[in-house]
Image (cartoon, rainbow, N blue to C red):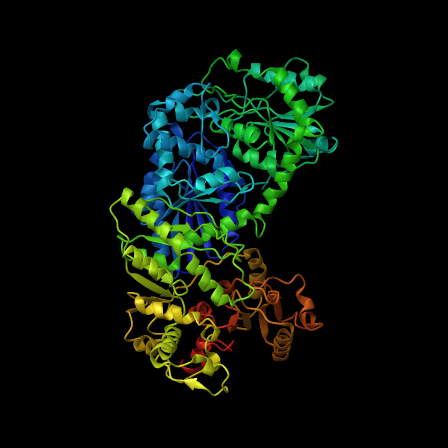
């Protein structure tokens, strides 16, 4: 498999479609092998989706919108109309996805990797299961809302609690994802109302636990408490905070509106806007107008005409535009406020929030609006209307302290013919007071907090940010862990748990528990980070890794024991064995303790496996001292069964000569296992595979290639553009792996050779780690300082020097005809996969094999 495709299914409604498109773009920009198809549903009465898709160009590459057939439907009185409508789309969804799978089956190296479902579309997990695809959820609200809904689902279905008791507004509910008890008056009404509509609604959210993971439109720095709570929730699949997912496309300020804002002082205007469903009856409009007038603040008010009451079994009717604002505003209001205020219909919200004149935002607290407010550093005052907006208001005001409250529990009555009841009207005095607090110079501390969060929201999406890494993790998980996927794809009875350890020096890999649902067949579990303060400066990297892995035996034992316990509770299953990495053979002892067999996954070649085992045999069975080969002349070599020519000692891996001889411990443990899985194939290494006798069974299952490396992919477009201009097979690519770097002298020699040869080249040049430190290479701030004077200028016509490189993507490009490599085994297999010849790299056993035996 080379390319993979995700199918996104947003629920009906323009806001969900726009969020889905923007989320898809974030993923597409990170991996050139990913493509996305979005299945578009629209309610029969909704024209906004067609208007958007017909007038808004979708500029993202590899993104396709597929409109599902539309027809009338009769809503059930026992279900929400939108949910009922989604249910009727099932056959169309299945037909569309099945057709996509069939088309992909006819293409080499391409497959559908899964469905990404809107939070209201979890019913389609059944279709994913039927088609043998994993499913994910894209949750367009925040982590706190996800946690709250998940907790209510658990109360109802796991504990049998009657949620209608929380219709009592005086109650508080302790919710794990909130640090303070949540007032019942801010809970989403549909979830505590009781009856079939409420049960069906909660039932759809219950299906989230059946998916592989949940992408959430938030970021770690905004909701750390909620995200940490979700990580430890046994019902919740892995959560990927990938936000803020925002859209500013096609939002510009027209001439008159822009001119008005340009005339206002910086930060002086309060902006009132209430989303796609936001409107008020005449009585509430009068109170808002009076509050604004009494506050004396400059204002811009997006005022929409109510679309009409909702009938039983009917759908929300979107607001429309007033022909004359005077018909709803207090008499003389427009004239009295003409010097400080402006009333308009629909407003380009993002563009307005981005204007320097806007210093406050009175909002319905929809999650998209919340993130837009944070992104632009504009503090909010809360006036929620429906859905989860009251809970959002509570979060913003009480938990995060980044908003002022007008009210946190206001609700619009969509079903009323007469309008708001007197007790539900927000008075002018409340609005005036909130506007004064919001627009005060210091904003009561809220303004400073919002500006701080503004910087964090932007940093989260930048390279190295929290959401940047979450997006990377989602793509890698969606693409699947290659070995686990190979195994589970061959036997429906098999499931795999992947236990991940984080080295203390690793600052990029996440360290929180990664879980999927109990029904998922691939589970990810991160062990807790090590806090013992491992020192690395006085020992070799190999010894350090070996000692660190050994220290993780206890956590691994605990994690596996918990998996066994959980599995026995959820469904009939048993632990069949351990598959341990070649450097994790210390875990063979844990397998013995638990009474299960163990296997080794050897990520290098069969030839290298044979060398390790042969050298271990020389030490243990013939009492040879390998150190005698360390200082011998270059001609010293030994015969190894897996090589057809003698292997010089000078090409043995350095770990062989390590003073702790840790490789001997690894090799001894290989012999204690029930089998060795090797990342090779018989046609590549027939001599080596057949020479591996008197051992546990050897399984050549390769090539297992990671096609989906996503780090630093914002550089990929520039690299691809440069390669596109080169003739086929004209470029030699120099890349030396994640640990590959050279000192200044060697860099100069490589540069001189490339310049003299004169062929096209692409060189991935990394900055060496500081001497004496066990760290990975970094990036040069100015690569020219490390290269010969004038090298970049003299070779600019045919060469390019970069930092980190997306190796697989480069090797796959038609312009690349040669590969100067460190001969890592993954790189070897990638080179073979794409037919790139090897000029030669560092001398290791795999390097010798490429030159001598093939």
| Residue 460: image location, x then y, percent | 57, 46
Q: Quadrant of residue 368?
A: top right
- Image quadrant for the C terminus? bottom left
Comparing 189 with 292, the one in front is 189
Comparing 320 with 796, the one in front is 796
Residue 59 shows up from this direction: no
Name which residue lies at 42% across and 80% down.
625
Name which residue lies at 48% across and 58% down.
709
- Asked if 238 appears above or below 623 in the picture, the reply is above
- Left of 22 or right of it: where is 557? left
- Image quadrant for the N terminus? bottom left
- Asked if 68 appears above or below 112 in the picture, the reply is above
Residue 798 shows up from this direction: yes
- Left of 505 or right of it: where is 648? left
| Outermost residue toward the left in this view | 572
Q: Quadrant of residue 713?
A: bottom right
| Residue 656: image location, x then y, percent | 45, 75
| Residue 30: image location, x then y, percent | 52, 53
Comparing 483 with 260, the one in front is 483
| Residue 570: image location, x then y, percent | 29, 42
Q: Quadrant of residue 280?
A: top right
Count of labels shown? Answer: 0
């Amino acid at each position: 498999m080379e390319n993979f495709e995700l199918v996104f299914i947003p629920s009906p409604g323009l806001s969900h479609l726009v969020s889905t498109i923007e989320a898809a773009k974030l993923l597409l920009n990170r991996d050139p092998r990913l493509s996305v198809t979005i299945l578009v549903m629209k309610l029969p009465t909704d024209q906004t989706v067609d208007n958007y898709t017909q007038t808004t160009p979708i500029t993202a590459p590899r993104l396709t919108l597929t409109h599902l057939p539309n027809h009338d439907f009769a809503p059930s009185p026992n279900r929400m109309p939108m949910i009922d409508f989604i249910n009727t789309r099932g056959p169309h969804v299945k037909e569309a996805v099945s057709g996509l799978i069939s088309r992909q089956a006819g293409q080499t190296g391409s497959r559908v990797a899964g469905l990404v479902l809107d939070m209201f579309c979890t019913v389609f997990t059944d279709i994913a299961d039927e088609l043998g695809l994993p499913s994910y959820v894209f949750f367009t609200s925040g982590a706190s809302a996800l946690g709250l809904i998940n907790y209510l689902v658990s109360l109802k279905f796991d504990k049998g609690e009657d949620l209608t008791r929380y219709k009592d507004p005086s109650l508080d509910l302790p919710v794990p994802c909130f640090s303070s008890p949540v007032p019942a008056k801010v809970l989403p009404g549909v979830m505590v109302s009781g009856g079939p509509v409420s049960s069906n609604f909660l039932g759809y959210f219950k299906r989230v636990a059946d998916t592989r993971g949940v992408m959430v439109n938030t970021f770690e720095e905004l909701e750390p408490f909620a995200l940490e709570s979700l990580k430890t929730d046994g019902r919740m699949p892995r959560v990927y905070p990938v936000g803020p997912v925002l859209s500013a496309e096609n939002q510009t300020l027209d001439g008159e509106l822009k001119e008005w804002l340009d005339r206002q002082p910086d930060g002086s205007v309060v902006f009132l806007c209430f989303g796609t469903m936001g409107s008020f009856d005449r009585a509430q409009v009068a109170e808002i107008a009076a509050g604004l007038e009494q506050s004396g603040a400059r204002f811009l008010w997006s005022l929409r005409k109510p679309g009409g009451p909702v009938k039983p079994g009917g759908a929300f009717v979107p607001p429309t535009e007033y022909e004359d604002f005077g018909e709803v505003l207090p008499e003389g209001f427009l004239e009295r406020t003409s010097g400080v205020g402006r009333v308009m219909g629909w407003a380009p919200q993002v563009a307005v929030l981005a204007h320097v004149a806007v210093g406050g935002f009175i909002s319905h607290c929809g999650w998209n609006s919340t993130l837009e407010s944070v992104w632009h550093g504009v503090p909010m005052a809360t006036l929620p209307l429906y859905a989860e907006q009251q809970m959002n208001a509570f979060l913003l005001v009480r938990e995060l302290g980044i908003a002022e409250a007008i009210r946190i529990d206001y609700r619009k009555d969509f079903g009323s013919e007469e309008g708001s009841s007197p007790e539900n009207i927000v008075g002018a005095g409340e609005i005036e007071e909130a506007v004064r607090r919001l627009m005060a110079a210091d904003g009561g501390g809220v303004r400073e907090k919002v500006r701080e969060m503004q910087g964090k929201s932007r940093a989260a999406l930048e390279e190295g940010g929290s959401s940047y890494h979450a997006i990377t993790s989602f793509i890698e998980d969606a693409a699947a862990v290659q070995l686990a996927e190979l195994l589970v794809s061959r036997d429906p009875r098999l499931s795999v748990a992947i236990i991940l350890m984080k080295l203390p020096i690793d600052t990029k890999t996440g360290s929180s528990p990664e879980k999927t649902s109990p029904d998922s067949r691939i589970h990810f579990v991160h062990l807790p980070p090590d806090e013992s303060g491992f020192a690395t400066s006085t020992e070799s990297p190999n010894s350090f890794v070996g000692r660190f892995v050994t220290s993780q035996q206890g956590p691994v034992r605990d994690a596996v024991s918990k998996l066994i316990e959980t599995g026995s509770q959820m469904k009939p299953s048993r632990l069949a064995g351990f598959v341990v990495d070649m450097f994790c053979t210390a875990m063979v002892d844990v397998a013995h303790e638990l009474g299960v067999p163990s296997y080794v996954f050897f990520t290098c070649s069969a030839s290298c496996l044979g060398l390790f085992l042969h050298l271990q045999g020389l030490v243990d069975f013939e009492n040879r001292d390998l150190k005698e080969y360390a200082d011998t002349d270059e001609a010293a070599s030994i015969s190894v069964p897996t090589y057809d020519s003698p292997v010089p000692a000078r090409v043995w891996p350095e770990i062989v000569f390590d003073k702790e001889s840790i490789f001997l411990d690894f090799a001894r443990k290989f012999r204690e296992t029930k089998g060795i899985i090797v990342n090779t194939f018989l046609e590549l290494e027939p001599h080596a595979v057949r020479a591996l006798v008197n051992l546990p069974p050897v399984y050549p299952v390769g090539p297992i290639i990671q096609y989906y490396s996503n780090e630093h992919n914002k550089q990929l477009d520039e690299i691809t553009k440069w390669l596109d201009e080169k003739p086929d097979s004209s470029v030699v690519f120099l890349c030396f792996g994640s640990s590959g770097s050279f000192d200044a002298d060697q860099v100069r020699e490589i540069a001189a050779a490339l310049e003299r040869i004169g062929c096209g080249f692409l060189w991935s040049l990394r900055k060496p780690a500081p001497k004496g430190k066990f760290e990975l290479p970094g990036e040069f701030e100015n690569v020219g300082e490390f290269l010969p004077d004038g090298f970049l200028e003299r070779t600019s016509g045919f060469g390019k020097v970069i930092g980190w490189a997306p190796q697989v993507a480069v090797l796959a490009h038609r312009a690349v005809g040669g590969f100067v490599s460190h001969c890592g085994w993954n790189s070897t297999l990638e080179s073979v996969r794409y037919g790139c010849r090897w000029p030669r790299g560092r001398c290791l056993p795999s390097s010798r094999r490429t030159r001598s035996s093939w």
